[in-house]
Every structure is written in structure tokens, then in C-alpha cells.
Amino acid sequence: MFDNKKEQTNEVLCTKGAGIARNLFFLVLGGSVGATIALLFAPKSGRELRRDIGETAGKGYDKVLGTAHRVQEQVGDYYDTAKETGLRVLDTASNEASDLREEIKGDAVKIGGMVGEAAKRVAKTVL
């Protein structure tokens, strides 16, 4: 059939991947907030402070964008794995159903022959 352990492993990886992405997002968010607060309390002129805030916001945006791209790639990989697993399960189920159908067909032919023989014997005894 198919490897149930592999499916469970994929499920765990999906869950861990989502948790890692969420934790990474909060880490970047917390770092950005902390950097912004540090800049606000730094002894700088307004122009320098605004420039520093803009640079920090740009860096934070770049980090978040990079993380979003990595998460998008991971989700694509997880989707591909789930699709492959689903197709294998479907193929296995289809093959099993086909084998079962052939087995039932063979049994029906045997039962039909037994019923036919029994009907002939009954007919001989009645006639």
C-alpha cells in the first residue's frame, strides 16, 4: 500500500513549518519594534532619526519579504508532497477496488455454477 509513517512525518513537518514561520515573523516584528523604540530614544536630530527609522523600516520590510518567499516555497513543497501522497492513495485504492471486483466476479461465477448444479439436481428429483 503506502507508507503511513511518511504521511505522519509530512504532517509533522507541515505543522513545524507553520510554527517556524510564525515564530520567525514575530521575531522580525519584535526586532523592528525594539529598533524603532531604540531610535526614538536615541540622542539624534530629527532628520537623522527619520532617516534611521526609514532605513530600519526598509530592512524590516526586506526581512519580512524574504521570510514570505521562503514560507511560500515551503507551502509549495508541502502542497506537492500532499498531492503526490493523495495520488498514491487514490491509485492504491483504485487497484484494491479493481482486485476486489475481480475476486467478487470470480466468486459470483462459482456460486452461479453451484446454484445451477443444485437446480439440476432438484429438477431431476422432482421430475
Image: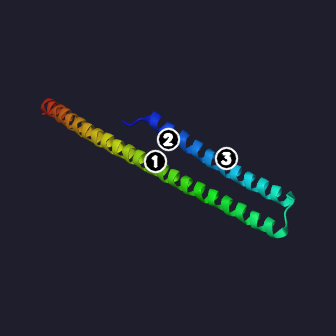
Q: Quadrant of residue 36?
A: bottom right
In the foreground, 87 or 28:
28
Rendered location of residue 112, percent (x, y): 20, 37
Q: Position of residue 25 (x, y in %)?
A: 67, 52
Q: Is residue 3 left or right of residue 43?
A: left
Asked if labels 1 and 2 touch by Cβ distance under 8 angstroms, the answer is: yes
| Residue placed under numbered mark 3 in the picture | 23
Label 2 or label 1, whichever comes before in sequence order: 2
Q: Position of residue 90 (x, y in %)?
A: 37, 46
Q: Quadrant of the N terminus?
A: top left
* Label 2: which secondary element: helix
The label shown at residue 110 is none
- Looking at the image, residue 49 sits to the left or right of residue 1; the answer is right
Category of crowding for the residue at label 2, using alpha-carbon neighbours closer than 10 angstroms: few (below 14), some (14–19), many (at least 20): some
Tally the marks: 3
Residue 123 quadrant? top left
Residue flagged by tag 2: what amino acid is it?
Asn
Amino acid marked by disc 1:
Ala
Q: At 58% from the left edge and 57% from the top edge, which residue is drawn?
A: 66
Residue to which mark 1 is pinned: 82
Quadrant in which the C terminus appears: top left
Q: Earlier in the sequence, mark 1 or mark 3?
A: 3
Q: Image height check: is 48 above or below 75? A: below
The secondary element bearing badge 3 is classed as helix
The label nearer to you, 2 versus 3, is 3
Q: Position of residue 67 (x, y in %)?
A: 60, 54
Query: How far is the residue under mark 2 from the one under mark 1?
Result: 8 Å
**Residue 10, labelled with which disc?**
2
Q: Residue at x 68, y 58 (%)?
A: 60
Q: Secondary structure at mark 1?
A: helix
